[in-house]
Amino acid sequence: MTNQMWLLLNNNSDSRDGRGDVDIQILSLLQQVAAPELQIEPMRLGDARSWLLLRQHPNYCAMSKIWTPERAEFLHFSASPTSVYPPLLLVSDRQFGSESIDFQRLLQQQPKLKIGLVQGRSYGENLDALVKQFPKNFYQRGGEFAAETLLQMLSKQRLDAIVEFAATVRSHEQQVAQAGEFIRHRLQSQPVIKGFLVCHKSPAGQLLIDIVNQKMQLPQYRNTVFKLHQDYFDAEDFALISNDLQQIFSPQLTDL
């Protein structure tokens, strides 16, 4: 018997052709290893529509979602993350400090700062709390290529900074010429970002998660996912996540 999963992808892709997005490559791998027990059909939708479907339908799932207590109330999370990203950075066209930045102190010291975010994302517990604490300092942009639009706004000085991954900024350097010159600031107390596969919290959703959990234990899957991360990130970024990847995907890692 073949089970059906509709896997929702955000309409605000980090890359124009999808090939630069490690999650898209992992999706292709998941489709291969899940067959024939599970057929995974991707669907690209707007963020609001995706969250509505995830709350209502047992066969709808999504990739690369950060765990939060609110989401755990209506979603099953995969046992292991599907992707691991380095800590988020504060990306700007000017220097805010030479060392890693205390983001809360920066917002308190410069209350007129306008920081860009991709709408609908969770940025992790610490940053999500700051967004709620300082709502006037954050501008959120949704829609297709939201990250690229925010970079364009930064290049035109319509924003003071954005919160983003270094790999995402790098992937848009062709569309935003100044992106290669932007300053990337480390933020204090920022962990690596782990994105999980999630499904509707129901018996049917649990069945889909159980199949995914089983397939994610296959050596072929674990070894390939490690290599995809290694190929996608530059050496500096990969060094920040390599320990986490080793913990998540060992002991099957061999010959890498």
Image: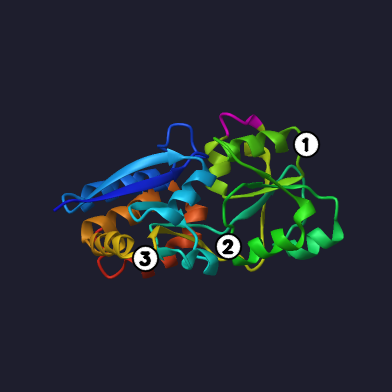
- 205 or 78, nearer to the observer: 205
When asked about the image quadrant of residue 102, the answer is bottom right
Q: Secondary structure at mark 1?
A: loop
Instruction: Specify the principal SS of the magenta part.
Output: loop
The answer to whether residue 234 of the structure is visible from this angle is no
CA neighbours of label 1 inside 10 A, class few (<14), some (14 to 19), many (20+): few
Q: Earlier in the sequence, mark 2 or mark 3?
A: 3
Res 255 visible: yes
Q: Amino acid at mark 3?
A: Ser
Q: Which residue is mark 3?
A: 80
Label 2 and label 3: CA atoms lie apart by: 17 Å
Q: Which residue is mark 2?
A: 124
Q: Which residues are magenta?
A: 173-177
| Residue at numbered disc 1 | 157
Element at label 2: loop
Seen at 55% across and 40% down, the residue is: 170
Q: Are marks 3 and 1 in contact (CB under 8 Å)?
A: no
Judge depth for marks 3 and 1 and give the one in front: 3
Nearest-to-viewer mark from 1 and 2: 2
Q: CA distance from mark 1 to mark 2?
A: 26 Å
Label drawn at residue 91? none
Callout 1, which amino acid? Answer: Gln
Residue 196 appears left or right of 215: right
- From the image, which quarter does the C terminus lie in? bottom left
Residue 171 percent location from the top left of the image: 52, 38
